[in-house]
Amino acid sequence: MCPRQRISRREFLRYLLKSGGVAFLGAAIYPIARYLYPPRGVESSVSTVVAATLGELAVNTAKIFRFGSRPGLLINTPQGELKAFSAVCTHLNCTVQYEPDNSLIWCACHNGKYDLNGQVISGPPPRPLEAYQVNVRGEEILVSKPA
Amino acid sequence: MRPLERLRAFFRERYPLGGLAEFATHKTVPVHRHSFWYYWGGMTLALIGMQIASGVLLLLYYRPSAQEAFESVRFIMTKVQFGWLVRSVHAWAANLVIFSAMVHLASVFFLKAYRPPRELTWVTGAVLLFLLMGFGFTGYLLPWNTLAFFATKVGTEIAGVVPVMGPIIQVFLRGGSDVGDVTLTRFFWLHIAILPLMVVGVIGLHLVMVQLQGMSKPLTVREERSIPFFPNFFLRDLIAWALILGAVLSVSVYWPATLGEKADPFAPTPAGIQPEWYFLWMFQTLKLVPGHVFGLEGELVAVGATGVAGLALLLVPWLDRPARRGRSHWMVLAAGILAVLYVVGMTGYALWIGHRP
């Protein structure tokens, strides 16, 4: 059995004061930290959008469309094939664009280049662009996230 | 008794001001061939003063929301009398204050003024440079133009790369998962409330340390000449302040700040996009680092290296061991010169590439 240790009244009060101080700081900092961190917004869970209408895009051109809260890129390739990708560069989140002269996707921020399959050709992007599915329904070009 | 003397007597009777006046008259500043560099700290302080004054004026008309920010800055520039001048002074002094702080830091480094007992003066100075860059980063977004929008996207994305805390910092800065209206509100809050409070606090500490310990004398200087801080050095400081105020007003009049186009989150990033010049060396580094380095993502490597460089900058007084014993070592000098060459070289390279047709 270990001997009972007696602590003086002064020590006890000092301990109480210190732990009270720590508890006060915690009680003050926690709600402030939670307040500063933004509430989780309702992320739009769009899975399919109408990106364009047929005939809107000439061969070897592209357009940026809204995919929920983010931009997407719809390309009518030189071969007349419709392709869609996320327009968000995988490097640092800039918005990419189509370069018709070289038939590639280019990011102006850090000179990242992707081919028409979204694969990285050169520059700093670490991953390919996220590819979307393209379907035509009547006059509308529908772009959807792969399931 | 004349009114001014009566006022002075009124305060002297109530507060112990004699000690302060005595301190100011007894404090001296060394005079030698490197004395020129002593004025850069004061100049940085004067520019910070200009930023506070012009920033307070801008607040009168600026509106911090994605719908109104761009229009309110255009209103300041085109409708408010002298609005163009106030905004231009704010934009120019913002650049000059960082330049001046960098020159001050470099001069303190090469003159080894950080050696004991002035280690913490160096640390507070380096923290001030980081805070000034924070001002630049947050203030850049406020006009809500295309350039600012994409620079902020990249900047906050870089913050997200930091291991463990990165995603939390990113969401905290953006106020959500993407740069948008809430990001502008947050940056405004940081720019006009949080950063000013921090800067005022750290400048206070920095100045108290400088006043208590006095100016450091370089190792190579043996002369013992000095002048009183007040009024001799202070009056020379005032001349430097008048010159820098004249310079800021001149460049603001001849090359007023531009506004560009309103940010459109659904437009592709325009070609030739670049951040402010003081971030260019980091921007160029990010551009040159390949996608993967030794199996790690390139951006993580670049951000990690920048973080290590920042930490090394803070710890210079302890890393330079010979200086602690009052000696100078060629390796420290070489490291300093290499760092300056890297930053200047990368900045120059980015500017050259940016201006190429």
Image: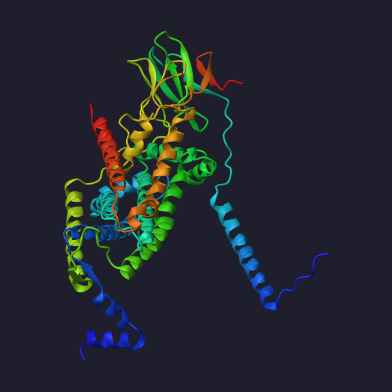
Asked if B354 appears above or below A11 in the picture, the reply is above
Residue drawn at the location 50% of the way across and 14% of the way down:
A139
Q: Can residue B76 be seen from the camera position used here? A: yes
Q: Residue B54 at what x, y percent from top left?
A: 29, 57
Query: Quarter-wise, where is residue B290 in the image?
Result: top left
Would residue B64 be found to the left or right of residue B51 on screen?
Answer: right
Q: Residue at x 46, y 10 (%)?
A: A81
Colour style of the rendered protein structure: rainbow
Of B203 and B211, the residue lying toward us? B211
Q: How many marks?
A: 0
Residue B239 x, y percent position in the rendering: 16, 63
Q: Residue at x 59, y 63 (%)?
A: A25
Res A109 seen here: no
> Who's the residue at 29% across and 68% down the image?
B214
The one of B16 and B60 positioned closer to us in this rendering:
B16
Nearer the observer, B237 or A104: B237
Q: Horizontally, is A63 left or right of B214 in the view?
A: right
Image quarter of the C terminus of chain B: top left
Question: Furthest residue to the top?
Answer: A79
Q: Point out the image quarter for the N terminus of chain B.
A: bottom left
| Residue B161 location (% of width, % of height) | 48, 37
Image height of A104 relative to B137, above or below: above
